[in-house]
Amino acid sequence: MKLLLVSCLSIFISSVWAFPSLQPLLDEASPNDILIIPAGTYSGPLSVEIPITIDGNNEVIIDGGGKDSVVYLDTDGAQLRNLHITNSGKSHNQIDACVQVRGNFNIIKDNILDNCLFGVDLQQSDNNIVRRNKISSKDSSLGMRGDAIRLWYSMNNKIVKNQITNSRDSVVWYSKNNLIADNVSIGGRYALHFMYSQFNRVENNRYDKNSTGIFLMYSDDVELRGNTISNSMGTIGMGIGFKETSGVTVENNQIIYCATGIYSDLSPYQPDTTNIFDNNKIAYNDIGVLFHNDWHGNILKNNQFIGNHNQVAVQGATTAKRNVWQDNYWDDYVGFDRNADGIGDTPYKIYSYADQIWMDFPATRFFKGSVILEVLNFLERLAPFTEPAMLLTDPSPRVK
């Protein structure tokens, strides 16, 4: 391995008006060299086909000129660090990105990746590290932006401590055993979206002001721990959502100020599996937990339900009793703890009263939270004409 301190005079300049290109110099390098680039702006695309370290010392810009991807990492064991990579093309079909990764054991760290349609795209690439990068997409409408980080058939990667703003999604497709931890994502659509991806870990991320925080579709045995998901609003706004997903552990998360805190559709789906929700704070949401239908197999214990307009709701059905509710704190529990053991003396129960009209007749959602529905709900509770349906029972509610 040798250290190459590049002189500006040695860089090939293709024309008087173009930025100098790094490619000729890279072609002359040997495997395991460390290429330290002088401060300045250089033109892309750049194709890296040997295990080499390219260090920009936070003074180097690689500009793609608005065409194609800016850097192609088609090797194993390379590093891109301390670079500003910018200005890719706009093609969704080509997945124009700041960095395209087609190799294993590469490291992409401490870079600024902006004005690119996609940020980092990993395809059939394993054991890579994407760390401490600042990533944003092009200034387009939300649906036309690209994904900040995209994994496709990629295993055992670590996506950690990145800051993502104003991109569309971060997606994990057909990928297993990846760690996604300590990232921040603000102002996107899906902060994190799984499709057909198993055995991944999502830990200590902060997702704020996205349409949806985390959504898992057909993605089993995923662990969600210590994440903070907030301000997922709008018609599809939700903190964490599940579609036919089994064997999930959701633990020690904060899900706050969302339209829907947790949404579950036919989950868990595989026979004889459970989804476990343990010690989460589900607070100040319009709906704390929303089930798409009367389903079973979920265990909800030791969670805190605070300040939600509706603690739990079920679409198309009147019960969530087939799930296990135990030792949760409910801020609207009305009961005593005479033996001071921290558990209410009577079970916590939720009934379906007139305020559930909006579940059966979507047009009435306009009046949700209004005085008229609150009055109807009060009258129904005061003197119900029919016996209300019980949504759930927590036999051992915590009182603090």
Image (cartoon, grey):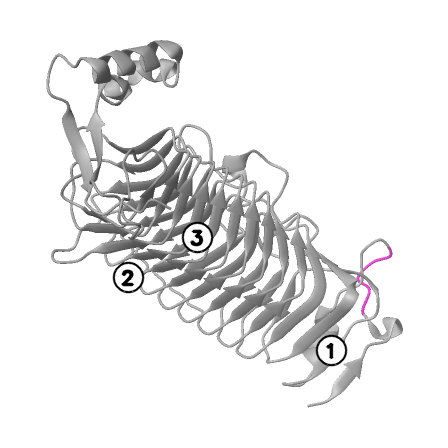
Q: How many marks?
A: 3
x and y percentages locating residue 331 in the rendered image:
37, 37
Residue drawn at x 28%, y 44% as measured from the top left: 337
Between 70 and 248, the residue placed more toward the observer is 248
Residue drawn at x 78%, y 63% as measured from the top left: 60
Per the rendered image, the range of residues in magenta is: 12-16
Residue type at the position of mark 2: Asp
Measured Cα–Cα span from mark 2 to mark 1: 41 Å
Between 22 and 359, the residue placed more toward the observer is 359
Measured Cα–Cα span from mark 2 to mark 3: 17 Å
The circle on residue 221 is 2
Query: Is residue 14 shown in magenta?
Result: yes
Residue drawn at x 52%, y 78% as measured from the top left: 76
Q: Main secondary structure of the magenta part?
A: loop
Q: Residues within 10 Å of mark 2 (few under 14, many from 20)?
A: some
Residue type at the position of mark 3: Val
Residue drawn at x 39%, y 14% as measured from the top left: 370
Q: Nearer the viewer, mark 2 or mark 3?
A: 2
Q: Secondary structure at mark 3?
A: strand
Between 83 and 189, the residue placed more toward the observer is 189
The residue singled out by tag 3 in the image is 171
Q: Secondary structure at mark 2?
A: loop
The circle on residue 71 is none
The residue singled out by tag 1 in the image is 35
In the rendered image, which quarter is residue 130 located in?
A: bottom right
Question: Contact, CB < 8 Å: mark 2 with mark 1?
Answer: no
| 74 relative position to 267: left or right | right
x and y percentages locating residue 83 in the rendered image:
71, 64
x and y percentages locating residue 31 in the rendered image:
63, 85
- The mark that comes first in sequence, 1 or 3, is 1
